[in-house]
């Protein structure tokens, strides 16, 4: 199988880099093909702007979605965007690997999403009607592929537990796992998390690699998070609210995961 | 009072720009002082790296938190970081204004947080003991100031409602409102949100300005979101889990808001 790792850490001698290198070796030893987009090493352009199309008229009002739609349709996207989209289409599974900075993606990785996820590629896909609100949340161009986050935190696991002060990890990651990965069609596996990174010694690193290896071995067989499909009948269209008979009386992020 | 608006949109003729200009005029007409950090116009450096300290040895392993701590303590931070920290200290209230891109901050604004929120300035502040886990989540250098998000979305309000498919807006924004604003001490006001931006006509813009003006008039009097203080007795330290007698039997992001 083909695996793309989109990796965002500035230091090649970091824990994240060592885990990334382990993942590449482990996957290749199983006969898989791996590509790594090492965003810091690539000096990947983080900021979405008019230069993301090679043909943007200098005096025209810049609408990010209009410009993206036109550039994707006309083949006038910037070369680095085209290259990353090709990697996504090549991949059977995509891993986003990053340290959790301020409870979200590092800016360089957030910018990768904003620029590579073009209109017509990751959003604005498919029919919009009173029965089908675009190919998204379970449908889309990336359907049939799997995705997983590999994330490291300075804090403790308990700080991210169900009643931990930072919020439960899966809730903190909902905008990424549901809003960025499930949205264009990926099946999303539970995240692989490493806590208290400053305290990871040799034994801790060995344990992390062992756990990571098991997760990588399960990329094709582990059960994904059962997010509800938008157009499968669970949501009222176009309000896109969960039907009252599902998860009755509940609200919050958890209702979008099937029981 | 002094208000800092940190603004992230690439197009000066956009709805976001018009709302930002309205906010500046409205606040100034009330006698307040306003500074705007227009991140796109400033070509603000979005990516945290070793260049954020003017004295980083080229061959040294780069640890983001160690480097930030040292640069903040030694006065060797990059000039643009120092300037933004000074604006934060000058401000009585801070507004982060942005279009919600992929359910989070635009990369340029996320990078502003990562770079300006130095170790010793926004984190790594105060005593760490078995009774006090750092000055954060209700304490910190930015305590006594207020903050508010001004956010625009292409989607409908119902899509962000309690059972809407994107997740409730306050849950989607929790990593920002709780993790980025409450963390270093801000009192956080409910967000000001504009939905279906592509359909905002002249009447819609006038209505949005009227609503925004009311929110700006309430910057000093509106009730903040009652996030629970970390060191006030609600959490077990160091596990930082909410005490079992509070919000009993519940979990998820909502438990961190007092009843």
Image (spheres, coloured by chain):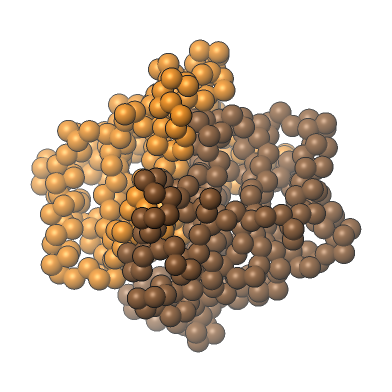
Chain colours: A brown, B orange
Is residue A69 visible in this depiction of the protein? no
Q: Is residue B79 above or below residue B197?
A: above
Q: Is residue B8 left or right of residue B135?
A: left
Which of the image's four quarters has the N terminus of chain B? top left
Q: Where residue A101 sits in the image (x, y, percent)?
A: 55, 42
Q: Residue at x 36, y 32 (%)?
A: B257
Q: Quadrant of residue B165?
A: bottom left
Question: How many marks do you count on the picture?
Answer: 0
Q: Nearer the viewer, residue A201 or B159?
A: B159
Q: Nearer the viewer, residue A258 or B3?
A: A258
Q: Where residue B79 sits in the image (x, y, percent)?
A: 47, 42
Q: Is residue B115 left or right of residue A237?
A: right
Q: Residue at x 41, y 31 (%)?
A: B256
Q: Is residue A163 left or right of residue B147?
A: right
Which of the image's four quarters has the C terminus of chain B? top left
Q: Where residue B52 sits in the image (x, y, percent)?
A: 55, 43
Q: Residue at x 47, y 25 (%)?
A: B242
Q: Nearer the viewer, residue B35 or A8?
A: A8
Q: Where residue A254 sits in the image (x, y, percent)?
A: 48, 47
Q: Residue at x 22, y 68 (%)?
A: B200
Q: Is residue B44 above or below residue B253?
A: below
Q: Nearer the viewer, residue A155 or B78?
A: A155
The residue positioned farthest toward the front in the image shown = A245
């Amino acid at each position: 199988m083909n695996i793309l790792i989109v990796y965002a850490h500035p230091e090649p001698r970091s824990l994240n880099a060592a885990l990334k290198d382990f993942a590449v070796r482990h996957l290749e030893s199983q006969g898989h093909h791996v590509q790594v987009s090492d965003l810091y090493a690539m000096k990947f352009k983080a900021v979405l702007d008019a230069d993301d199309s090679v043909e943007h008229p200098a005096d025209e009002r810049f609408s990010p979605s209009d410009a993206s739609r036109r550039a994707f349709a006309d083949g006038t996207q910037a070369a680095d965007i085209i290259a990353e989209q090709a990697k996504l289409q090549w991949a059977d599974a995509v891993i986003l690997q990053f340290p959790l900075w301020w409870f979200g993606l590092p800016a360089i990785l957030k910018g990768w999403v904003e620029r590579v996820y073009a209109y017509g590629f990751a959003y604005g896909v498919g029919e919009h009607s009173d029965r089908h609100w675009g190919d998204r949340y379970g449908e889309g161009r990336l359907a049939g592929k799997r995705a997983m986050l590999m994330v490291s935190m300075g804090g403790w696991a308990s700080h991210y537990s169900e009643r931990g002060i930072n919020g439960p990890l899966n809730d903190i990651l909902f905008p990424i796992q549901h809003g960025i990965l499930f949205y264009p069609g990926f099946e999303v596996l539970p995240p692989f998390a490493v806590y208290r990174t400053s305290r990871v010694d040799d034994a801790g690193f060995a344990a992390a690699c062992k756990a990571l290896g098991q997760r990588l071995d399960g990329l094709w067989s582990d059960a994904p998070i059962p997010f509800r499909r938008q157009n499968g009948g669970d949501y009222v269209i176009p309000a896109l609210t969960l039907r009252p008979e599902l998860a009755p009386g509940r609200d919050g992020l958890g209702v979008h995961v099937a029981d």
